[in-house]
Image (cartoon, helix red, strand yellow):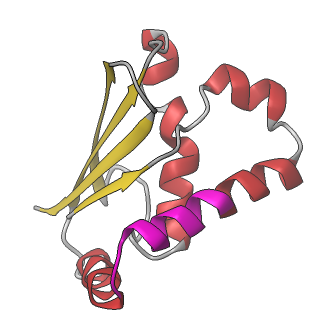
Amino acid sequence: MMLTVHMLPPSPNVLRRKYRNPHVYKKLRETWENYLIVVSGSALKTAAIRAMAKSGAKILVKITIYHKKAYDKDNMAYGAVKVVLDAMVNVGFLEDDGPEHIDLFVSQKIQPGDPYTEIILEAM
């Protein structure tokens, strides 16, 4: 299943500075949760993603960030997608974001135009 969210997750540096207050981080996570539900499309697709998460199978999660300016390698790896993974767990798209439940691959592509995040979920 592929989801395209027209929003970028903040880098870990931005998370530390701008979202250090738990209430502000919660609002950011809730925004991602809402976007994920909307971009999943139909209730049928949302139910299919949730069923895949509850199946007990390990899930391959590929997150690609498309934007104009690259994050540093150390910021890109997993810190940048923390809010995305937290939101996916909260909406039921992932059972948990631990290594026993998911294989996570994060990449970025530099391109002009509006930034967006592409998420691909596959049962293994």
Question: Does residue 20 appear to the left or right of 115 in the view shown?
Answer: right
| Foreground residue among 7 and 105 | 7
Instruction: Name the residue: 47% across, 65% down.
Output: 36
Q: Residue furthest left?
A: 124
Question: Image quadrant for the N terminus?
Answer: bottom left
Residue 57 spot, x, y in % from top left? 18, 71
Task: Report the magenta residues as a range.
Answer: 31-42
Instruction: Name the residue: 53% across, 63% down.
Output: 35
Q: Kindly indicate the quadrant of the structure image that contains residue 14.
A: top right
Question: Does residue 114 appear to the left or right of 105 in the view shown?
Answer: right
Residue 61 spot, x, y in % from top left? 27, 50
Residue 72's place in the image compared with 47, above or below, is above
| Foreground residue among 42 and 11 | 42
Question: Does residue 79 appear to the left or right of 15 in the view shown?
Answer: left
Q: Kindly indicate the quadrant of the structure image that contains residue 110.
A: top left
Residue 98 spot, x, y in % from top left? 41, 53
